[in-house]
Amino acid sequence: MEFSSSEENQSFSLTKFESMLKTNNVFFFDSNEFENIIHHYLEIGKIALAKKAIKLGLDQHPTSINLRLFRVEILIFENKLSEAAKLLNMLFELEPNNEELYIQKANIHSKRDQHEEAIEVFKQALKVSNDSSEIHSLIGMEYLFLDNYEAAKIHFKNCIDLNIEDYSSLYNIIYCFEFLDQNQEAIDYLNWYLDQNPYCEVAWHQLGKQYLVIKDLNKALTAFDFAIISDDTFIGAYLEKAKVLEQLNRFKEAIDNYNISMAIEGPTAFTYLKIGGCHEKMHHKDKALKYFFKSVKEDPAFDKGWIQIAHFYFSKKDDLKALFYVNKAIDIDEENVSYWLFYSKINHRLNYLEEAERGFKKTLELGGTSLDIWIQRGDVLIELGEIEAAKYNFVQALEYYPESEELEFRLSGLCFKLNDTEAGFAHLLNGLHINSEHIFIIEELFPDVYKSQNVIQFIESYKKSDN
């Protein structure tokens, strides 16, 4: 339904309508005025006012199909699908060739997760539609719900054929290509598109991103340059170009592009962070730190800025400052696995073993289950003398990594420490079977176990039988 009133008439109608609501006076509006008023309230999300306008509109124009269609739209929005379907059926008897009726009927099917049925109804709408572009877009979205990206792509391409400047459909086409891992096909399509619309900054930008996926940095850089030529205020193109320049080690040029983006858009925490990163790679340490602090001053809730400052001080071996700033990052995002892992490493280097262990435990709880994390936590527990806890940690780890000699040798040493000789020899044998060269793990972590006569004899016996 098109919003046909001029801005001046719309403003007058809205003022008149809202005055009527406040004073309880009843003013007359023609049906087009009501349609424009309802459309306005729906666009800005004022559903209650839209419903009032629909009711008053139908009171004055009870036979208006469009006003009743707005009523259907509200019922669908409120999930009153049976009531909406019943009203639609009545309207179909009055106007069987009204494409909006088909669209709303299909929307009901879609709301019920009946996407195949919705598609069939939309295809019926194509036969009576004056604007098939909108219908093709809606069909494409239904195919996306069904994860049928090839079919979705066809309909979004139809939209482009009908309107070369339909950027929403262009984004959807590229999304389909990306989901199907068809990067070269995406590049081919974008090049075709640019032959039709050569000054489209959106297409150049998307082409650059596709070249990034296939690691063709020079072509990506050229594409972003053309995006900027097409629109020299296109922030996204400057940022992407700067990132490519960083990868090419052209850090000064990258900084120039980040600065241009800030001149257009104003400073952002992200841009300050990226400039700081460029200075750091150029070994301008003082400038790097200055920009890292600018990023968190611009946005104190920017955790990536705080963590970068923490990494900066960690690299300078100023571990207390690193710990202070990593805590700031964790306060903002306490579910971030990498932050807790870094927290553990700092504490371990400071010999704050209890806190290091707490950090490793939290890292594991949040899903960071790499073998290295299990081993680091277990080794800290060994340093703390928590033998039972260390054993339990490695037993858990063995469920994820059953073929790890690093775990088997550690468990062997711990079992011997706990006087569980049978389990100690079993784990020792498992470790030797997997990789006997890593026996030094027991030697380093449990020297007394390694030097015991029974273990020495067992290892020598294994080596003889292995030969």
Image (cartoon, rainbow, N blue to C red):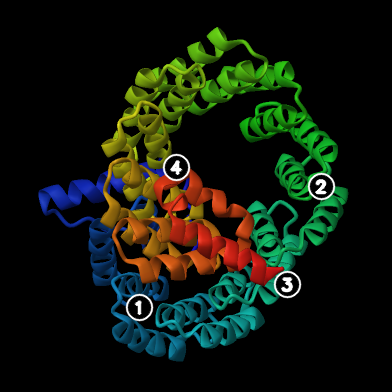
Rendered location of residue 289, percent (x, y): 50, 14
| Residue depicted at x 29% and y 84% | 83
| Image depth: mark 1 or mark 2 in front | 2
Q: CA distance from mark 4 to mark 2?
A: 44 Å
Task: Indicate which disc, 3 or 1, sits on the residue closer to the N terminus.
Answer: 1
The mark that comes first in sequence, 4 or 3, is 3
Label 3 element class: helix
Label 1 Cα crowd, 10 Å radius (few <14 / some 14-19 / many 20+): few
Instruction: Assign a secondary structure to mark 1.
Output: loop
Residue shown at 35%/19% (left/top)? 320
**Which class describes the residues within 10 Å of circle 3: few (<14), some (14-19), or many (20+)?**
some
Q: Amino acid at mark 2?
A: Asn
Q: Type of residue at label 1?
A: Thr
Q: Marks 3 and 1: which is nearer the front?
A: 3
Quadrant location, the C terminus? bottom right
Q: Between tags 1 and 4, which lies in front?
A: 4
* Residue occupied by mark 2: 197
Task: Name the residue carrying label 1.
Answer: 63
Residue drawn where x is 48% and y is 43% of the image: 444
CA distance for labels 2 and 3: 19 Å
Quadrant for residue 300, please give it. top left
Can you say whether 321 is above or below 339 in the image? above
Real-space Cα separation, disc 1 to disc 2, in angstroms: 45 Å
Instruction: Give the mark nearer the N terminus: 1 vs 2.
Output: 1
Q: Is residue 340 above or below residue 210?
A: above
According to the picture, the residue beneath numbered tag 4 turns out to be: 338
